[in-house]
Amino acid sequence: MFVSVTGMELVGGKWRTISGVSYLFPVPLSYITIAGIAYFIRGWSQLQLAITLPSVLLFGLWCFRFSCLWSQVMSWETSVISIDRSPLS
């Protein structure tokens, strides 16, 4: 909420109305997407798994890449080389 208010303060004129309305566009799109997934996956537990698993995998990938960057910044080359040679990358 804070980001949307700050963004509306930075723009002026007619763009204030457009930015005030457009920051909520992803919400109905996510409802439509979940309804489309639920049409093909009927069980609630499989639906929950199908919705949750991609975000968990992407978060794990983000943490892995962030740890490689952190190791490079801290100049631990041996750690970075051993991480980069893993079979996942």
Image: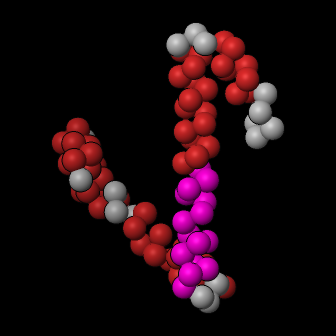
- Spot occupied by residue 83 in the image (x, y as percentages of width and height): 70, 27
* Residue at 56% across, 81% down: 45
Report the magenta residues as a range.
Answer: 44-58
* Residue at 73% across, 23% down: 82
The answer to if 49 sits in the magenta stretch is yes
The answer to if 16 sits in the magenta stretch is no
Left/right of residue 53 with respect to residue 6 in the rendered view: right
Residue 24 visible, this orientation = yes
* Residue at 60% across, 63% down: 53
Left/right of residue 47 with respect to residue 11 in the rendered view: right
- Spot occupied by residue 40 in the image (x, y as percentages of width and height): 66, 85
Using the image as rendered, state which of residue 41 and residue 22 is in the foreground: 41
* Residue at 61% across, 13% down: 76
- Spot occupied by residue 9 in the image (x, y as percentages of width and height): 18, 42
Using the image as rendered, state which of residue 26 and residue 16 is in the foreground: 26
Using the image as rendered, state which of residue 60 and residue 51 is in the foreground: 60
Count of numbered marks = 0
Colour mapping = secondary structure
Decide: is 48 above or below 16. below
Decide: is 65 above or below 52. above
* Magenta region, main secondary structure: helix
Picture quadrant where residue 89 is located: top right
Residue 12 visible, this orientation = no
Decide: is 27 above or below 12. below
Left/right of residue 35 with respect to residue 57 in the rendered view: left
- Spot occupied by residue 46 in the image (x, y as percentages of width and height): 61, 80
